[in-house]
Image (cartoon, helix red, strand yellow):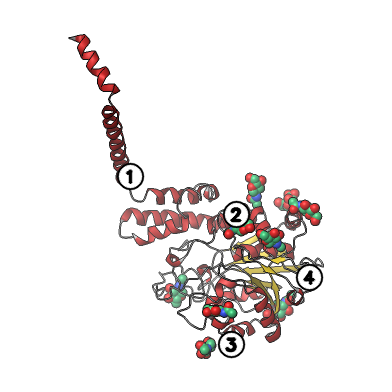
Amino acid sequence: MGKSHRNFILRIRRSPLFWFVTVCFFCTTMIFLMNVYVFSNPANATVKRDVQPFAGGLFKGAASLKMKFKHPVIADLNINKKEAKPAKTNRRLVLQKRMARLVSKLRVWHPNITKVMELQYQIDKYLNGTEFISSQENTPLGSLYNDTFFNKSIVVDDAKRRLLPERSPFASNKRYKTCAVVGNGGILRNSSCGPEIDEYDFVLRSNMQPLEGFEADAGSKVNFTTVSQSLMTTYRLLENEKFVLNFTNLNITKFITALEKYGSSYLLWIPNSKVSNLAFEILQLVQETTKSKVMLFNSKHSQLIQQYLNLTQRSISTGMTLTSIAISLCDEIHLYGFWPFTFNYKGTNLPMHYTENLLWSTYKKYHDFPSEFVQLIKLHYKGVLRLHVEECYDDDGNNDGYVGNNDKKASNSNTMTVQQG
Ligand SMILES: *[C@@H]1O[C@H](CO)[C@@H](O)[C@H](O)[C@H]1NC(C)=O
Ligand SMILES: *[C@@H]1O[C@H](CO)[C@@H](O)[C@H](O)[C@H]1NC(C)=O
Ligand SMILES: *[C@@H]1O[C@H](CO)[C@@H](O)[C@H](O)[C@H]1NC(C)=O
Ligand SMILES: *[C@@H]1O[C@H](CO)[C@@H](O)[C@H](O)[C@H]1NC(C)=O
Ligand SMILES: *[C@@H]1O[C@H](CO)[C@@H](O)[C@H](O)[C@H]1NC(C)=O
Ligand SMILES: *[C@@H]1O[C@H](CO)[C@@H](O)[C@H](O)[C@H]1NC(C)=O
Ligand SMILES: *[C@@H]1O[C@H](CO)[C@@H](O)[C@H](O)[C@H]1NC(C)=O
Ligand SMILES: *[C@@H]1O[C@H](CO)[C@@H](O)[C@H](O)[C@H]1NC(C)=O
Ligand SMILES: *[C@@H]1O[C@H](CO)[C@@H](O)[C@H](O)[C@H]1NC(C)=O
């Protein structure tokens, strides 16, 4: 009896059907268990993890966590969306408290010019003589002018090369005593920082933001601004065309009019579009029609700076590019409008940009703002630059026009796709 039983088992083991059934059973069980695991996990598990780096010793882990977990800015948004649940509101309050702690830490700042010089030397060495603009000096005839992110190269012929300056206007160790870099962050809204910004010797601005109507918060002085090709959608003729591929869909009048507000300041063109590279057409247009000192950004420089800052995952933002340029041009650097969160430490919801009511939910994750912000905080503590993340008070300690309630006006109506920087 025992023997025949053993034989039966042996026979069954040899049968393919046995193995088929066993494997099927195993797989089904695994799928079932995985389902149980996934659905029993609270939906906000990732959010919780995301919020952690912000808590942990000032964004400490943010840079390393970005690969695995959802974008912390987006995590904030999830919190915003589900505010009805008390747990989420608590999380927002916790985050707000951490922000308050950060803001109060950032109030302390000891400039260290030695450190600025040291960093500048390090960056220069890392860049290996790569300048941030393309000039005749660094662009031989027949070389390729590349896009900063995509493979949209242009062969530089003689006519194109002649549009470039002979050498960089910043090559001769030109340095400015005090500089302000004005980012586009919604944190500038109602800040009353305009007069303070206008006091710096050299003011760098991002992406040709409108100046009129924002003087009180962002000032009016401008000495340097970037404009990127992805932003040309703002100057489209036909709204139904998605991109500006060439001048047939560009409202040249609108573009030139906007540029004229920038007087004779430096204009840095950043080619960052996967559909076309209008660099030299724009260079010629601007040179012929405005007083702007227009220059082309050197993509090699962009790559190296991004590498230097360990920002490998997403493309470097314009704000960070401007900061690196300021480090090489200025003794004392002040940053305004840098804050990658959807609300401030007082709990006021912020739009993505101070100039428009775009919501953060329209943000298309082109940049790694949290990692960049971590870098900026480190530089603040080292005395290399000063991050201004609060409203600017006047002499009596008041500030005019700051209202700390939620900005209900921010609407989703303007959902233009902006690759913003
Ligand atoms: C300024 O930076 C230099 C160079 O890194 C450093 O040696 C010095 O201690 C710093 N000064 C202060 C006051 O922190
Ligand atoms: C730095 O530049 C020198 C000369 O221009 C070149 O020989 C060298 O390969 C460059 N190094 C790097 C790391 O790009
Ligand atoms: C750009 O071209 C290089 C080689 O020509 C290729 O290795 C790389 O993947 C391309 N990048 C993109 C974004 O297409
Ligand atoms: C910066 O621009 C302002 C005008 O907005 C001008 O008065 C000032 O001289 C410029 N500063 C430098 C250093 O070029
Ligand atoms: C210019 O772009 C338009 C689309 O906006 C396209 O139809 C046209 O063929 C382009 N012209 C040239 C010369 O590339
Ligand atoms: C171009 O822009 C200007 C200024 O915004 C506007 O007045 C004009 O109607 C636009 N032209 C066309 C053809 O859309
Ligand atoms: C542009 O890209 C090509 C191919 O990817 C590369 O060989 C060349 O060195 C690049 N030029 C510059 C100036 O970066
Ligand atoms: C980038 O990473 C390297 C290696 O981990 C590190 O030595 C360096 O300090 C980092 N650079 C910055 C700017 O944080
Ligand atoms: C800015 O001030 C206006 C008017 O006082 C107010 O309605 C709005 O909520 C404020 N926005 C922010 C982001 O503080």
Q: Which residue is mark 3?
A: 253
Question: Which mark lies nearer to you, 3 or 4?
Answer: 4
Asked if the residue at label 3 sits under 8 Å from ligand 6, the reply is yes
* Above-or-below relation of 58 to 226: above
Quadrant of residue 124 within the rendered picture: bottom right
| 1 and 2 marks in contact (CB < 8 Å) | no
N-term mark: 1 or 3: 1
Residue 232: give x, y in percent of width and height: 56, 76
Question: Which mark lies nearer to you, 2 or 3?
Answer: 3
Dot label at residue 38:
1
Question: Which mark lies nearer to you, 4 or 2?
Answer: 4
Question: Which mark lies nearer to you, 1 or 4?
Answer: 4
Residue drawn at (40%, 52%), measured in percent from left and top?
A: 47
Quadrant of residue 34 within the rendered picture: top left
Is 295 placed left or right of 259 in the picture? right
Q: Which residue is mark 2?
A: 311
The amino acid beneath tag 4 is Gln
Front position in the image: 314 or 329 = 314
CA gap between label 4 and label 2 equals 29 Å
CA gap between label 3 and label 4 equals 29 Å
**Quadrant occupied by the N terminus:** top left
Residue 282: give x, y in percent of width and height: 65, 78
The amino acid beneath tag 1 is Val
Dot label at residue 136:
4
Q: State whether residue 313 appears in this view.
A: yes
